[in-house]
Image (cartoon, rainbow, N blue to C red):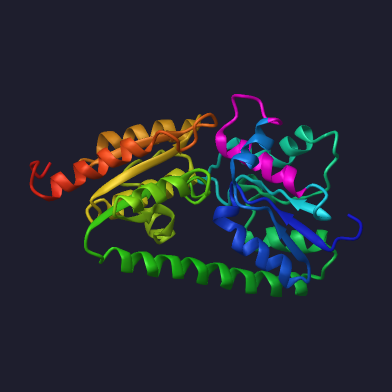
Amino acid sequence: MGEIRTIGIPRGLMAYRSGVQWKAFFEGLGFSCVVSQKSSRETLERGMERAVDETCLPFKLYLGHIQELLGACDVVFVPRMGGYQAKEKLCTRYESLPDLVNNIFRDERPRLLTVSYDWNDRTDEEKVYMELGETLGKTRGEARKAYASARRRMEQWRRDKERRQKALLEREGIRVLAAGHPYVLHDPYMGGEISRLLARQGATVLFTDYVDREKALKRSYHFSRVMPWLINRELTGAVMLLKERVDGIVLLSAYPCGPDALVNDMLVRKVKEVPVLSLTLDAQSGAAGMETRIESFIDIIRYQKAGGYGKN
């Protein structure tokens, strides 16, 4: 690929799930990483100039992050992600991500570093990182050492998040579970604003992706045995695990996500233990206009905790 010193990581999509590990791996091999800035309205506007109207809000933001990195690094890391096993499915956009980026930015001809997580090839994670190391001109020994270190760092990061969330579950007051894709929940322009609005109302905010992933996956089969989407499985399993330990649930989606539209409707129908608020963010308004709905939702929770409604 020519000389590479700096690797760009767009702060979007699956970076919110695996970005800690990606960055640690590249740095373990001796490369510098450039991570794009946190999402803003400017990020979205850059992405909207590139995307067709029908694409989802997270993808438009992702394109804005790609645009920011062009010229700021030697290559941009854009993996092709299908999953590790046949039962794991991700949005088709993940599976075609390098192709989409290359086509959308064809005039700029970006240098992309990519690798494929493909369940059709029975690809396991270590194999993916060995291939990345080879592409970057490193030995298998160097890649294996960097991968082992990066995986330990990722696992520690996840344990820390899970431990802190367990402590928050013991807090007095209103506990609200935010349920959604990690890149929606934690992106400052999307879920970040919703979390701030909830916190302003005095709620402790918990997240579905800060629950033990294996336990959530296992529990998701009590909700549906045929749901194909991995991230939706994880979030529904987390909802099932925590629904009786929280005072309310906010289902957070970004328009027009097909899997979320189906799964969130199922959750609204099935979860009866606590109030559920379903919010959909779009490119036009973002989190604007959500404050009144969140205030009303918290008022309902307070009223119910005070005994204003029956148990169910």
> Along the line of sight, which residue is nearer the eye, 41 or 300?
41
Residue at 61% x, 45% y is 82
**Quadrant of the drawing holding the C terminus:** top left
> Which corner quadrant of the image does residue 211 belong to?
bottom left
Residue 60 sits inside the magenta stretch: yes
Give coordinates of residue 285: x percent, y percent.
Answer: 49, 31
Number of numbered discs on residues: 0
Task: Out of 219 and 97, give the one closest to the viewer.
Answer: 97
Q: Quadrant of the N terminus?
A: bottom right
Image position, residue 306 (x, y; %): 10, 50
Q: Is residue 267 left or right of residue 105?
A: left
Q: Position of residue 235 (x, y in %)?
A: 40, 48
In the rendering, at what x and y percent does residue 255 appear? Answer: 49, 31
Q: Nearer the viewer, residue 5 or 297?
A: 297
> What range of the chain is rendered magenta?
49-69
- Look at 61% across and 24% down and name the residue there: 53
164 inside magenta stretch:
no
On the picture, is 312 further left or further right than 139?
left
Query: Looking at this rendering, what residue extends furthest in the top direction?
Result: 53
In the displayed structure, 65 sits above or below 134; it is above
Q: Residue at x 78, y 33 (%)?
A: 103
Q: Considering only vertical position in the picture, is 129 above or below 184?
A: below
Dominant SS in magenta: helix
Q: Quadrant of residue 278?
A: top left
Q: Residue 42's image quarter? A: top right
Residue furthest to the right in view is 2
Q: What residue is rendered at 29% in x and 54% in y? A: 202
